[in-house]
């Protein structure tokens, strides 16, 4: 049989004739692909979870932060001038009226809360009811602070408070059961009792991972600790509290730049000394850093495929010796160089194709039973990446067959059939 | 423990944010001392107030550190000469850091010990510092009793990251994005500080506290310190060795499972390739096998020959792999040295890896070795080999 049908037939016959060898090469390809799938799934899953958590912090927020030392948390403008006070908040609220979802002053303190289950250090936020627009995941149970929630006039009375789900879980066990319960707190060195009226749903998927390895949490600036979502929310005291942070919630991500520009003008005209923090820009910078780290991870799977290439290439090179006489005979019968070369190349492609389904299946098993329970985040294989790794494997199979194919192409039928195997 | 102290794994540094409502005070120091004494009797606590408005003429800025007797032990400072100062001594005493001694105008004798160090506030906005000679009438003076090595020589920052590391720099940048700003305190690392008794200066807030405890108990001590300060109305930032906390974390054992998963996958791929190679080389060496069989070798002899070949190949490969790994690790450590990292040979892991690879190879090679041994000399003769 000559031509394309002959090429296809010969490449398949070679696989059938050497079943054991083909099976072992397919296994090598499949395991190589499985480890690639496991690496890619882990990296992409982690990246997606981190992106989710960052976006859950709110990409349409702009914050004015009174000048504490914040590291590089505040990507944006640091201005010189006087600190932001409550009168400025009222003025900004008025100037941005109608063009934002909310403008909320926030006071952030480190506090201690105690229940019969134990004591926990966490941030205490004092804010206004409009802050609820910032809480993307919404409420798990109960309600957020409302206008009627005020500090009591009598000492010893309970203060209405909302609590983050993760903190409620630590202090009360079941977060939903926190509603209506009282917690004893210390803020600013003073003790008080707070009654929980609502539980805010936890936006962070990486909670378990963060708590296990966040060994630097005690070194984090107090305003930044708000983003750990271990907060107790208390009502704002209009005549007493001063803002450490003013959080402006834009209607959408596209409105952020315009609102940031308007805030810049207000800062300049009022001569405020604050950080203008645009969460969208910060998220973008953090994601950029994560992309760089994922780039390093992707380098590992490329290395993995190169190792598989070297191994299968070596096997193919040794294996072709077995078929040299048969090839020489076909050349002597009139087969062209392409007709003897293409089946060798195609054999590598068929074997890599046969390895794809088992390779992806084993990779998924590794992810499901070996990696996900340990890392605590869901793996994710984007279709684009599955397609890419399969193409990568097929290219590996093709390249692995390249040397044997060249050997076949350069074969001298007369020399081989004459019994000389010194090629 | 000595190495652990050098890397600061026993240390917790405490400060409050610039602009915070409440600063740290001497009373906070006493409170932490008393809380830790109950739970961690070996803990050392020290507090420092730093004034940066001192200068040595023509040599730059110096830092006057008002401290206590516990600082030398709490910060693991290394005494080069003399002794640490005594509290309430008369005349008051001072300990100098070695680079500061080198920057001072030449002393009358080689050693500054026993000479008077003075600080004159009257001359400019900086307090002028001098050693020996005529003491200006407006100056305060201290008796030099000791010289210490510059603490900055350890090149490890309060979070335990090597300051000479590019990779540490990347991690620190990422931490800064998340609101963790590793402290920049030139008085701690610059070698230009002079340490005096707090009582010999006017009372000042405590800028820094340093707590030293057993490294294995740093995390629990940190919680206690933080809670104590919050109860006192402070919002502290606490710095402790991040790497040590992670290494001591029980969750790390779980993460090491990933390492085992990829080790197993790699070994299985290696064994599959080895089986394939043995099968192929066995076929190429059919003539040799037939000849040995014709000479009287049994099938078992051939089986053992190929099995040992497989085992030997994997043993040499595994040993070479360990060797290459160790060489690469030493090259990496040698080419880019770091204060916090040294390359060692993990004997136990290396032996385990070699044993697993070799045993796996012995099992994997059995089938191909048995297949190869199945050669009939008469068949080969018929084929004309």
Image (cartoon, coloured by chain):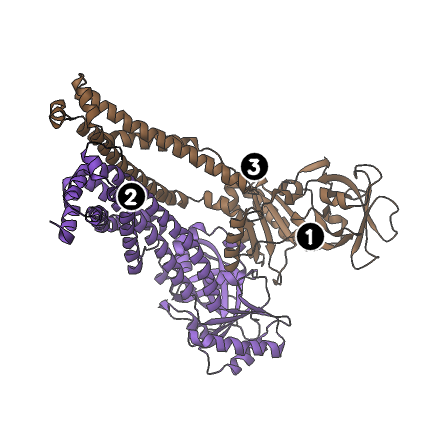
- In the rendered image of the structure, the colour used to display chain A is purple
| Residue B70 shows in this picture | no
- In the rendered image, the vertical position of residue B277 relative to residue A10, given as above or below: above
Letter of the chain that mark 2 sits on in the rendering: A
Mark 3 is surrounded, within 10 Å at the Cα level, by few (under 14), some (14 to 19) or many (20 or more) other residues, namely few
Q: Are marks 2 and 1 in contact (CB under 8 Å)?
A: no
**Mark 2 surroundings within 10 Å by alpha-carbon count, few (fewer than 14), some (14 through 19), many (20 or more):** some
The alpha-carbon separation of the residues under discs 1 and 3 comes to 28 Å
Relative image position of residue A3 (x, y in whole percent)? 15, 52
Q: Can you identify the residue that label 1 sits on? A: B49
What's the residue at 47%, 71% (across, down)? A61
Chain B pictured colour: brown
Front of the two marks 2 and 1: 2
Which residue is painted at 58% across and 59% down in the image? Answer: B233
Instruction: Tell me the element at label 2.
Output: helix
Please tell me the numbered disc located at residue A403.
2
* Outermost residue toward the front in this view: A414
Residue A316, image x and y in percent? Answer: 25, 41
* Res B133 → quadrant: top right
Residue receiving disc 3: B3
- In the rendered view, does B107 fall on the left or right side of A281? right
Q: Where is residue B301 in the image (x, y as percent from the top left)?
A: 21, 20
- 3D distance between C-alphas at marks 2 and 3: 54 Å
């Amino acid at each position: 049989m000559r031509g394309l049908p002959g090429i296809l037939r010969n490449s398949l016959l070679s696989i059938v004739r050497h079943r054991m060898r083909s099976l072992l090469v397919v296994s090598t390809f499949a395991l190589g692909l499985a480890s690639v799938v496991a690496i890619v799934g882990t990296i992409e899953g982690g990246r997606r979870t981190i992106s989710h958590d960052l976006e859950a912090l709110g990409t349409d927020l702009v914050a004015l932060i009174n000048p504490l030392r914040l590291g590089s948390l505040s990507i944006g403008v640091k201005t010189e001038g006087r600190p932001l006070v409550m009168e400025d908040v009222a003025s900004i609220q008025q100037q941005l009226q109608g063009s934002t979802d909310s403008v909320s002053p926030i006071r952030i303190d480190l506090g201690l809360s105690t229940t019969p289950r134990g004591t926990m250090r966490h941030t205490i936020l004092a804010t206004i009811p409009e802050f609820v627009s910032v809480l993307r995941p919404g409420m798990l149970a109960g309600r957020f602070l409302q206008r009627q929630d005020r500090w009591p006039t009598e000492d010893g009375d309970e203060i209405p408070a909302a609590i983050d789900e993760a903190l409620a879980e630590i202090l009360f066990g079941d977060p939903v059961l926190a509603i209506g319960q009282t917690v004893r707190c210390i803020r600013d060195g003073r003790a008080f009792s707070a009654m929980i009226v609502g539980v805010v749903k936890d936006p962070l998927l990486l909670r378990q991972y963060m708590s296990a390895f966040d060994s630097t949490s005690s070194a984090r600036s107090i305003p930044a600790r708000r983003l750990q979502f271990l907060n107790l929310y208390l009502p704002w005291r209009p005549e007493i509290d001063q803002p450490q942070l003013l959080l402006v919630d834009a209607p959408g991500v596209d409105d952020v730049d315009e609102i940031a520009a308007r805030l810049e003008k207000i800062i300049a005209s009022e001569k405020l000394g604050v950080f203008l923090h645009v969460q969208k820009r910060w998220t973008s910078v953090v994601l950029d850093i994560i992309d760089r780290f994922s780039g390093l991870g992707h380098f590992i799977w490329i290395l993995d495929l190169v190792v598989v290439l070297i191994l299968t290439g070596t096997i193919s090179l040794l294996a072709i010796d077995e078929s040299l006489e048969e090839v020489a005979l076909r050349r002597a019968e009139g087969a062209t160089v392409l007709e003897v070369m293409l089946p060798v190349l195609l054999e590598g492609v068929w074997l890599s194709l046969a390895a794809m389904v088992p390779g992806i299946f084993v990779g998924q098993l590794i992810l499901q039973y070996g990696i996900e329970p340990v890392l605590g985040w869901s793996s994710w294989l984007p279709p684009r990446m599955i397609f890419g790794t399969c193409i990568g494997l097929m290219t590996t199979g093709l390249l692995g067959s390249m040397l044997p194919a060249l050997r076949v192409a350069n074969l001298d039928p007369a020399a081989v059939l004459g019994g000389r195997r010194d090629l | 423990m000595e190495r652990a102290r050098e890397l600061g794994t026993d240390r917790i540094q405490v400060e409050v944010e610039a602009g915070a409502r409440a600063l740290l005070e001497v009373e906070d120091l006493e409170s932490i001392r008393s809380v830790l004494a109950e739970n961690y009797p070996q803990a050392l606590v020290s507090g420092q107030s730093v004034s940066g408005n001192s200068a040595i003429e023509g040599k730059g800025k110096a830092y006057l550190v008002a401290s206590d007797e516990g600082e030398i032990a709490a910060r693991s400072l290394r005494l080069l000469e003399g002794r640490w100062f005594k509290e309430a001594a008369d005349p008051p005493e001072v300990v100098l850091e070695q680079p500061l001694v080198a920057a001072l105008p030449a002393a009358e004798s080689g050693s500054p010990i026993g000479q008077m160090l003075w600080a004159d506030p009257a001359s400019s906005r900086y307090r002028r510092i001098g050693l020996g000679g005529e003491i200006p009438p407006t100056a305060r003076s201290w008796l030099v009793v000791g010289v210490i090595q510059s603490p900055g020589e350890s090149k490890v920052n309060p979070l335990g990251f090597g300051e000479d590391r590019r990779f540490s720099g990347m991690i620190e940048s990422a931490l800064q994005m998340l609101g963790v700003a590793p402290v920049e305190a030139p008085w701690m690392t610059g070698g230009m500080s002079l340490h005096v008794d707090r009582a010999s200066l006017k009372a000042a807030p405590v800028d820094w506290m340093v707590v030293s405890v057993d490294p294995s108990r740093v995390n629990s001590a940190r919680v206690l310190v933080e809670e104590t300060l919050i109860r006192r109305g402070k919002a502290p930032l606490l710095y402790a060795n991040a790497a040590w906390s992670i290494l001591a974390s029980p969750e790390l054992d779980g993460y090491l499972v990933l390492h085992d998963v990829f080790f197993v996958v790699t070994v299985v791929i290696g064994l599959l390739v080895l089986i394939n190679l043995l099968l192929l080389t066995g076929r190429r060496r059919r003539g040799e096998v037939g000849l040995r069989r014709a000479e009287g070798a049994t099938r078992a002899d051939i089986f053992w020959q190929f099995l040992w070949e497989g085992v030997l190949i994997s043993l040499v490969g595994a040993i070479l792999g360990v060797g290459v790994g160790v060489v690469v690790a030493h090259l990496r450590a040698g080419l880019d040295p770091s204060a916090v990292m040294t390359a060692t040979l993990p004997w136990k892991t290396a032996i385990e890896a070699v044993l697993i690879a070799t045993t796996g190879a012995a099992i994997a090679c059995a089938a191909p070795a048995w297949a190869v041994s199945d050669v009939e000399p008469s068949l080969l003769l018929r084929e004309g080999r």
